[in-house]
Image (cartoon, coloured by chain):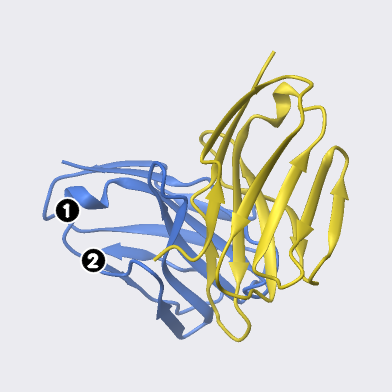
Amino acid sequence: NAGVTQTPKFQVLKTGQSMTLQCAQDMNHEYMSWYRQDPGMGLRLIHYSVGAGITDQGEVPNGYNVSRSTTEDFPLRLLSAAPSQTSVYFCASSRRVGAEQYFGPGTRLTVT
Amino acid sequence: TQLLEQSPQFLSIQEGENLTVYCNSSSVFSSLQWYRQEPGEGPVLLVTVVTGGEVKKLKRLTFQFGDARKDSSLHITAAQTGDTGLYLCAGANQGAQKLVFGQGTRLTINP
């Protein structure tokens, strides 16, 4: 039981490049979410999903896309990276929105 | 927009002292969670409170949910260096599908 896995752990992009952050969970959780964490800002919700085929926007969705084709996977796509997207990204899963959130180890992204 | 305000944002105290951190909002939450995060790792759940006025204890940590379910506090008795970390509160609104986090309290316990 691996829990929530995220890849890559570190990534450096140039402005304008695109990439996908991968997230997978093996706990059969319906609810998955992506957060970004910046100094002094806590965790801000980017996108979330309440089940396969269903996604919705969080607080800071601009510049990011998501899809949920399976229960296990919830990738986050950066369409055209900008320096403002330099952050640590966390994926989380849970049985439902008010239940315990299980977080992945994070991806540290730097955009130059 | 942050719906949850945590205070203080930073707190540095000596080992053995007591402390309280706060999580406040103008919104009513159906449940509120407290997480602890260590450097380089994701947050880990400490407790969930769901009933107004509820008090939960986890060893030296005491969590309270406000009567109106708009605020919460975390009290640590006789702090230890192992309590050092970032403490985050998170709230779920009734009927909403989003979990919103506060900006966190960075706690440092000095030996």
Q: Residues within 10 Å of mark 1 (few under 14, many from 20)?
A: some
Q: Quadrant of the C terminus of chain A?
A: top left
What secondary structure is found at the residue carrying circle 2? Answer: loop
Q: Image point 49% across, 68% down: which residue?
A: A73
Q: Marks 2/1: CA distance?
A: 9 Å
Q: Quadrant of the N terminus of chain A?
A: bottom right
User: Which amino acid type is shown beneath numbered disc 1?
Assistant: Ala
What is the chain identity of the residue bearing mark 1? A
* Same chain check for tags 2 and 1: yes
* Chain colored yellow: B
User: Which amino acid type is shown beneath numbered disc 2?
Assistant: Gly
Q: Image point 38% across, 46% down: which residue?
A: A38
* Chain colored blue: A
- In the drawing, does residue A83 fall left or right of residue B102? left
Residues at marks 2 and 1 touching, judged by CB atoms closer than 8 Å: yes
Q: Which residue is mark 1?
A: A82
- In the drawing, does residue B38 fall left or right of residue B64? left
Q: Image point 17% across, 53% down: which residue?
A: A82
Q: Which residue is mark 2?
A: A63
Earlier in the chain: of badge 2 and badge 1, it is 2
What is the x, y in percent for residue A66? Answer: 36, 72
Extreme top residue here?
B111
The answer to which quarter of the image holds residue B51 is: bottom right
